Amino acid sequence: MQKEKLLQIFEDLSGYCQEYKVVSEGELVLKIRECVKSLSDTEIEVLEKRLSGNLEALIFKSITSEDKISVFSPDMRTRINYQGEIFYCLPTHRYMSAELEATFLRWAKIRSPLSALRSVITDFMERCNYQVKNEVSGDETGHFELRAVKNGKNKERSVHLFILPSIKFVSHFWEKNQTLLERSEVGEDKVFVVPTEKTPAPFISFIREHDIGTMIWVVDVAKRTVNPFIGTPQDTEIENNFEAPEQARRAVSVWMRKMHVVD
């Protein structure tokens, strides 16, 4: 019975791997966890006793190495580091950069829920004495839009926030909404809000490949902090509530200098 259960798990995982050809490490871990959770506690205990180890870890190792626990295990042992994330693909599959990019974007949506980013940026804007208004659009579009408004002594300030699951989505969004983003309104800032990445690589790639005039802020969901990446806000209260703006801008300056040296 346990062998049949393990076979079913590997069949499900094989179908998933065949469908996408390239999968991120985090995505694969979550998919394995989902499959294992379909088993009862007793079934998991029996399998772990028979295989002498943690079932999720053993399945992951079986898929991503030559150390197989079943002949039915999919083989995704080709390991690739792309933009700071680890990806696996079939040894016989000649992956293309477009597939890695698509997989990165798919994983970004999973690992950086828009609701979590929205929660942090809402708290941040409220600390800056802004009232955050209802969303302009929702999660089904792949982004959130918020408007934050502050009534000052002489004028109203407004920040139009575009929340995206990765810096890698910014150029796609810009191309589709350039007219909206370039439209200038008195007292309004437009800002892309994106999460941190495992390494600076996606941000360095962005600087190298794109020249977008809209401000970009980076959210650390775990620390619930916000820092600037591109641009300086008109409101000094926002600047004062960034976690470490000088350090963040210094890092960007270093990346740009290194980029010019390489060029």
Image (spheres, rainbow, N blue to C red):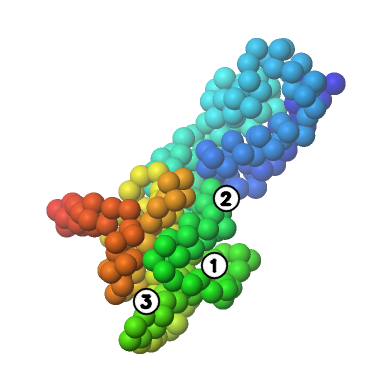
Please state the horizontal and vertical placement of residue 155, each as a whole percent of the image: 35, 86
Q: Amino acid at mark 3?
A: Asp
The circle drawn on residue 110 is: 2
Q: Secondary structure at mark 1?
A: strand
- Please tell me which of labels 2 and 1 falls first in the chain: 2
Residue at left offset 45%, top offset 77%:
149
Dot 2 falls on a residue whose secondary structure is: helix
Query: What element does badge 3 sit on?
Result: strand
Within the image, what quadrant is residue 61 found in? top right
Residue 145 located left or right of residue 6: left
**Residue found at x 53% / y 25%:** 65
Marks 3, 1: nearer the viewer:
3
Residue that mark 1 sits on: 144
Q: Position of residue 5 (x, y in %)?
A: 79, 27
Q: Foreground residue, 42 or 154? A: 154
Residue lying at 38% horizontally and 56% vertically, measured from the top left = 226
Name the foreground residue: 65 vs 137: 137
Question: Can you tell which mark lies on residue 189?
Answer: 3
Q: Which mark is residue 212?
A: none
Q: CA distance from mark 2 to mark 3?
A: 28 Å
Residue 253 shown left or right of residue 233 in the figure: left
Q: Residue furthest right?
A: 1
Vertical arrangement, residue 52 with respect to residue 262, above or below? above
Say whether residue 96 is visible. Answer: no
Q: Considering the image in quadrants, where does the N terminus appear?
A: top right
Q: Residues within 10 Å of mark 2 (few under 14, many from 20)?
A: few
